[in-house]
Image (tube, grey):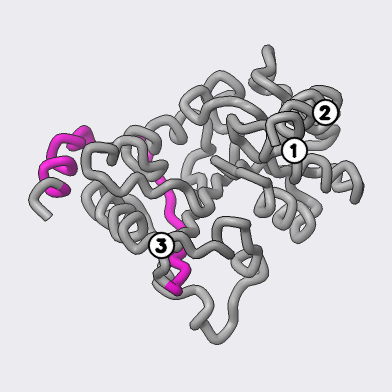
Amino acid sequence: MAQKKLQRFADIKTFANVLEYPEHMPGKWQVFFKNENEIILELACGRGEYTVGLAKLFPQQNFIGVDVKGNRMYIGAKKCLTEKINNAAFLRTQIEKLATYFTPGEVDEIWITFPDPQLRVSKAKKRLTHPRFLRLYQQILKPSGVIHLKTDSPDLYLFTKKVIELYDLTIVEDCGDVYQQTQVKEELKIKTHYESLDIAQSNKIHYLKFTLPATLKNIDDQLQEQLKNE
C-alpha cells in the first residue's frame, strides 16, 4: 500500500491537470483552462468524484478539486486524463491557503461535499462551513457567489443552518433529505466514495445552497457559546 501511494505521488507530478502548491496562479486560471468560463471549486475533494461528475454535466464551466492528499486526488485526475475531460483540474494544497491561488472574485461557486463534520465542539472551527472558513471564501468568491454543502451528517447540516441564521446569510435551497425529493437535480445525484460508506449512518443526504453577504458579522464567540450550551 505504501509503495502504491508513493507511485501515485510520483505520477501526479507528471499530470498536466494537477497543480501542487503552484506559484503565480492568481488571475491565471482562465489562461490555464484556455477559456473564460466560470470557475467552480470542490473543497476537500478526496478522490474527485464530484469534480469529475460536475465537469461532465457542465462542460461550459471549469472545475477545480482542492485537497492536500495527492494519493486520493490521483484517482479523479487520472480519470479526467483517460476520458479527456479538459474542464477539470486538481489543486493540491491546504484549504486555508486558498487565497494564495485565486484573486478576489475569481471563483463563482464552491462545493463542499461530505467533509469531515468535526463533531466535537472543541473542533467546530475546523468545520468547512464555520465563519472562519466563510471569511476565507469571501476573499475569492465573486459577490453573491454560491456555496453548496452536501453531507450525510445531520450535525454539520444543522450547524451550517445555525451559522446561516446567526450571520444573516441567504439560503437559496435547503433540502433535509435529497433522495426523497420527487425530482432530484442531476448534480445532486453524483455520489462520492464517502457517501456510499454512510459514515454518519443517517440514511439521509442533506443539501444546502447559500450565498454570503459582503461582510460577515464578528460574533464567533456567540456562536461558540451557543454550541457549548446545546
Q: If the image is split into quadrants, where does the C terminus sit?
A: bottom left
Secondary element type, mark 2: helix
**What label does residue 11 carry, if any?**
2
**Pointer 1 and pointer 2: residues touching (CB < 8 Å)?**
yes
**Is tag 3's residue or tag 2's residue first in the polypeptide sequence?**
2
Q: Tell me if residue 226 is in the magenta stretch.
A: yes
What's the residue type where badge 2 is placed?
A: Asp
Secondary element type, mark 1: helix
Q: CA distance from mark 1 to mark 2?
A: 8 Å
**Is tag 3's residue or tag 1's residue first in the polypeptide sequence?**
1
Q: Is residue 84 left or right of residue 7?
A: right
Q: Report whether residue 172 is seen.
A: no
Q: Which residues are magenta?
A: 203-227
Q: Report whether residue 20 is seen.
A: yes
Is 61 rendered above or below residue 73?
below
What's the residue type where badge 3 is placed?
A: Ala
**Residue at image mark 1:** 74
Is 18 rendered above or below residue 211?
above
**Residue at image mark 3:** 200
Q: How many marks?
A: 3
Q: Residue at x 18, y 37 (%)?
A: 219
Q: Give whichever of 145, 119 is nearer the camera.
A: 119
Q: Residues within 10 Å of mark 2 (few under 14, many from 20)?
A: some
Q: Is residue 165 left or right of residue 156?
A: left
